[in-house]
Structure formats: structure tokens, C-alpha cells
Amino acid sequence: MLPSPPPYLVQDFLELSAMRLPDKIALVCDGKRLTYLEIDRMANRLANALRAGGVQRGDRVVIYLPNSIPVVVGIFAALKAGGVFVVVNQSTKQDKLAYILNNSRATAILMDGRKPDLVDSLVEAVPSLKLLILTGGAGTVGQSEPSDQAPALLNFEQALEQYPDTRPARQNIDLDLACLIYTSGSTGDPKGVMSDHSNMIFAASSIISYIKNVEDDVVIDVLPLSFDYGLYQLLMVFKFGGTLVLERSFAYPAAILKRMVEERVTGFPGD
């Protein structure tokens, strides 16, 4: 009798596509074109950095950045590390960001290190934080270990260079929490919507089946990855093995339309 297969998890969207289509362009963003294998290896490296920084199964990893390569890598790295990703809209103010971090009991945050005052305020306001991963050249690999006084600091770019790209051992099952999506809090405190791996896999698979997506599809995403519809464009494309063109916003429609022609976009989700 054959052993039962392991549970299907959200990170399998990336991992299976990286095995099947390693050299295919998966992501076009920030002037770069990354293959499935490149993104998978980057996510493995960051996942190993998260594990080394104290992230354990079920821990919340907050990502506070605009649509960019680090957000995509961070989402899958958090899952590979056994954690739960929480993408927070870049427009979220400091007080609501601190509220979300405390409400989710965040263990780690990936954010722009060029905002030292914000970094310092969050360290003071959020006692659950063990690890700060900073983009923009801030922080150093292994600068400090987590302690009762301050979380450890890691530089995002250096972590991708110095940690191994071996895939971390799995800890999760499909009923484990995969993601928290917070409301804007326009009518009160932000509320976190919980989605486990099985929920997200079902939703992504259902939409792909309805739209009839194929590997040749090129989808442009101008919606924030903190928004569920924007997030699912990433997850769906990586599941069916297409190409995602990730933009920061639709603030400049003419530039987006030009990009759509250049990349031969076949899918344009709108709000």
C-alpha cells in the first residue's frame, strides 16, 4: 500500500511550478524578470532566515511594503517557514500598523529599513516582535540575536545571499492558518480575516477553473497584494504556471496600458 501524499499547501503553487517550469518567467516587476526557479530559491533563502530568526509554525509574519519582489518572496518564505503571512497596505498609518502587529501577535516584520523612526516605534510598541527584516540596505545579517530587549535585525538583500536555498522541512497541514487579511479599519479597528491552506487552495482553484486560465496567460496586477483580489492574482498565476506582471498601482493608466501591450497581457483584473 502506497503512503498517503502530504497535504497540499499554498506554497506548492510556487514549488510545483518551479519543478515543472523552472526557466519560465514567473514575475515581471521593478524592471526585473524572474523565473519560477529563481523565486523559489529566493523564498527558500528567506524562509531559512526566518527560521534562524525564531519564526516557528503558526507565527505571524507581517509584510509592510508596496507591491514589489520582496513582497512576493516574503509571502512564500513565510509559508515555507511554517508561518502565516500578513500583507499590510503600505498606506496604513503607524497607529493602525502597530494595532495589526499586536492584534496578530506578529513574530516578524518585513519592511522598508529607510524609515528608522517607524522601525524604532514599532520595536517599542510591539513586544511580540522577534525579527525585523529590512529592505533598502538597512540591517545586517546576524547583527543581533532576539532578546527580551530588542528583536534581531536582518538585511533582506544580504539574507538572500547568505542563507542556503535548501527547502525547509515542512511542518504544516492543510488546516493550518496560511494568511490573515486585515480590513482597512475605516469604521473601527482593522479586522483580520483568517484563511487556512485548504480555503485558499479551493478558492484559487475554483477561480482558475471558472476563468479557464492556461500557462500562456500573462496577468497584470495593479491591485495591492494586501487586498484579497490582488493577492489571489499572484496565487492563481503561480498555481497555473503563467506570468504575473506586478505593478504598484493604477495611478498612471497610460503607462499601465503601454505595459500591457509590451507584455502581451491576456488578463487584467479590476476592482
Image (cartoon, rainbow, N blue to C red):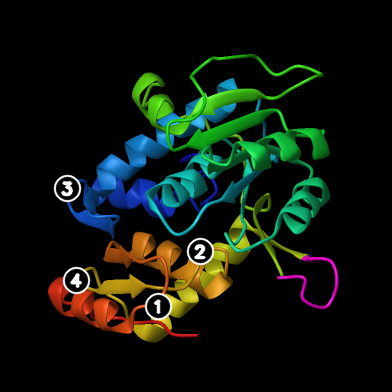
- Nearer to the camera, 265 or 119: 119
Q: Is residue 212 left or right of residue 171?
A: left
Q: Choose the circle earlier in sequence order: 1 or 2.
A: 2
- Nearer to the camera, 68 or 38: 68
* Amino acid tagged 4: Asp
Q: Residues within 10 Å of mark 4 (few under 14, many from 20)?
A: few
Real-space CA distance between mark 3 and mark 4, rounded to the nearest whole angstrom: 14 Å
Q: Which residue is mark 2?
A: 225
Occupied quadrant, residue 202: bottom right
Question: Is 163 contained in the magenta span?
Answer: no
Q: Which residue is mark 3?
A: 23
Q: Residues within 10 Å of mark 1 (few under 14, many from 20)?
A: some
Q: Residues within 10 Å of mark 3 (few under 14, many from 20)?
A: some
Real-space CA distance between mark 3 and mark 1, rounded to the nearest whole angstrom: 29 Å
* Amino acid tagged 3: Asp
Occupied quadrant, residue 82: top right
**Image height of 72 relative to 129, above or below:** below
Real-space CA distance between mark 2 and mark 4, rounded to the nearest whole angstrom: 22 Å
Residues at badges 1 and 4 in contact (C-beta under 8 Å)? no
SS at badge 3: loop
Question: Is 186 contained in the magenta span?
Answer: yes
Helix, strand or loop: magenta stretch: loop
Q: Which residue is mark 1?
A: 250
Which span of residues is magenta-colored?
184-191
Residues at badges 2 and 3 in contact (C-beta under 8 Å)? no
Q: Which residue is mark 4?
A: 216
